[in-house]
Image (spheres, rainbow, N blue to C red):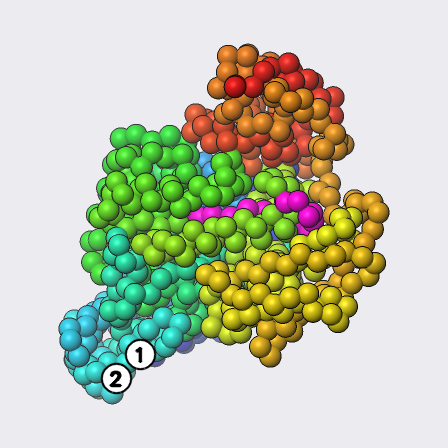
Amino acid sequence: MRETKNINSQWDFIKQSECVTLDLPHTWNGKDGQDGGNDYFRGTCTYEKTLKREDFPSGEEFYLQFDGVNSSATVYFNGEKLTTHHGGYSAFRVKLENIKDENKIKVEVDNSPNDFVYPQQADFTFYGGIYRSVTLIGVSHNHFSLDRFGSNAIAVTPDIKGNIASVNVKTFTQGLGEIHVFVDGKELVGSDVTFEIESPHLWNGTKDPFLYTATAQLVVDGVVEDEVSTKFGIRSFKIDAEKGFILNGEVYPLRGVSRHQDRPEIGNALSYEHHKEDMDLICEMGANTIRLAHYQHAQEFYDLCDERGLVVWAEIPYISKHLENGVENTKTQMTELIYQNYNHPSIVVWGLSNEITMAGSGKSVADNHRMLNSLAHSLDSTRPTTVAVVTMCPIDDEYVHISDVVSYNHYFGWYGGKVDMYGPWFDKFHKKYPNKPIGISEYGCEALNWHTSNPEQGDYTEEYQAYYHEEVIKQIIDRPYLWATHVWNMFDFAADARAEGGENGMNHKGLVTFDRKYKKDSFYAYKAWLSNEPVLHICSKRYVDRVEDKTSITVYSNLDEVELFVNGESVGIKKKGKYPFFKFEIANVGESVILAKAGELTDESHIRKVDKFNEAYRMKEEGAVINWFEIETPTGYYSVNDTIGDIMSTLGGKIAMLRIGKIMLGALKDDKPKEKGDKKKKKGASFAGFSFNTGMLKLAYGFTVKRAVSMMGGKFTKEEILRMNAILNKVKKKK
């Protein structure tokens, strides 16, 4: 019988000739990949471990399994090179032969930039290391295949017709033997068998995520020599262009989040407890779907999705930029994704790519998507394909219409534009392509512990993020045709190239902080909308000191009415309308205790009247120390508070922007990483690690100059900003 041993403990890790002994999982970028500067170590490090013969499990043949190594791994055993695996997010195995009394495993791990392994350009940190578990597997000569792209050699395909479920089970073996398969108390013999289950217990999302088990045994001369099993769910689903997602014949709107897999200091080297905590928070919020971006996640997390009933979008890291030399890698990663995750009932779509036209579209992009689309359908005929399209990609672009369904990544109200643009944009797409299911694959904005009573786009306050999500939620509620919507992101995550919001190295679009300790107000906006549990939450609890005489209090609740009390006196009752957001205006005098009541629930906050704005609430700008409200904005003339698109709409504005562009390029040409090793100076303008291109410049037209400057990570002096503003102050606006 098969025996598996975990060998995570006591590996020698060598980085630049320095050696330490550590336990797996591990990444070498847990700190430098989160501190900003886009200077984290990307190169080759080595992991080594010595195994004695008695350390091996019982068996006649032995395999070494890696659950995740980023991003390329070359494996040696007793000095012999066995394989090189390219792709940092999928499992792979190698066969070990000629076992000695003492054996040495050596793994060279490389996360260096290249042009053939995805991802290479993206807004997250590419952590290097053996960051998931390593196991030894011992089997007899006759066994279920361990060479099938990292899969467990059993594939279950349920199909429902009326009150009968047909459950097909295929197995893949090496060697001899008779295969016995067990499902729902029944036994069939063969490598390709079909069970019939009357009145099956359906896997019904978060309502009832029921799971069956399929077990296969390989029997030789009456003895079971190997056994594999898998959980599976019986469900039907359809994605309709008008009704959205339909699960088991009922409309089931998919409303949820996206997730990255990292934590402070440990990077992506997560434990099961970390995965479970993430799942608990997602379920607490009331989400019923999750986009696992932008790569294959840990099997433990897919299992949790199955068990909790979350509907999953699973994808490969084909992202941001098409690499001509990376075509084969997209094929391999898609094959591994589908083979390794085929049995998960939670997965309903295979994602082909994300924002792949960021660096331009064209024939090669379309051709590769057609290849991947055909490949996915050939490997799995039961699930549709999808893509996540970058906002500036035209809706008529050929590649947008290759996959079965499609979603767009939009950041109206954050990266330019206004937050009320979502609904009209999707209505336009839906009207032109009424038979194409359309969804929102990303939307969001950043928030840290900054606060204001007058939130505005680009201020990184918790209040603006809450306002933003309120407005998008309203537009989603009014458009049931959206097949799925995924907030970007459930959690703050590391993106070492970023320098925004007063804390470098982070993307702060999460509804929950990076350490999972604080749920931002926007988290509760979704909880009030999506959760079946009673919800009551007063916003802006961290915003205590307020200068205004009257102040606004926002309360989120899914209950019918909310009553607000200030220092024990009621200031009114608000009835729930179409949306779960309650707004109150109260006097701000002295110290005030705010109490909200709804049904049996209460929530409390505190505010205090002050004469001067508390600067602890204002974002700390890196680089230029400047009070934005002091910028000159003469009536009828432009300033840095105007959008680049508006400025460029006039001849004088275009000339002014040419002058401003020279100032910007002068500052950016000296952009280089902090001194943390031997790094080459970067050339050209960039943001968050992306070089500017035509598509990004189109997007930038929606930014104010102020916004563009702040997003570039404090690279400008106060004097340079004032020069830009002075130039614009001389240009008359359009009448």
Question: Which residue in the protein does label 2 denote?
Answer: 184
Q: In the visual, does 29 lie left or right of 547?
A: left
Q: Is residue 217 visible?
A: no
> Along the line of sight, which residue is nearer the eye, 337 or 694?
694
Q: Whole-percent x and y of residue 75? A: 44, 52
Residue sitting at x 74%, y 25%: 718
Q: Is residue 157 visible?
A: yes
Q: Residues within 10 Å of mark 1 (few under 14, many from 20)?
A: some
Q: In the rendered structure, which disc, 1 or 2, sits on the residue that comes first in sequence?
A: 2
Residue 175's quadrant in the figure? Answer: bottom left
Secondary structure at badge 1 equals: strand
In the figure, 362 relative to 552: above or below?
A: above
User: Which segment is the magenta one?
Assistant: 441-455
Q: Whole-percent x and y of residue 112? A: 51, 39
Question: Which residue in the protein does label 1 denote?
Answer: 212
Hey, what amino acid is under mark 1? Answer: Tyr
> Along the line of sight, which residue is nearer the eye, 614 or 390?
614
Residue 457's quadrant in the figure? Answer: top right
In the figure, 507 relative to 58: above or below?
A: above
Residue sitting at x 51%, y 63%: 580
Point out which mark residue 494 bears: none
Hey, what amino acid is under mark 2? Answer: Asp
Residue 619's quadrant in the figure? Answer: top right
Residue 337 in magenta stretch: no
Q: Whole-percent x and y of residue 199? A: 21, 83
In the figure, 437 relative to 359: above or below?
A: below
Residue sitting at x 63%, y 72%: 597
In the rendered structure, are the residues bearing label 1 and label 2 in contact, judged by CB atoms less than 8 Å apart? Answer: yes
Q: Residues within 10 Å of mark 2 (few under 14, many from 20)?
A: few
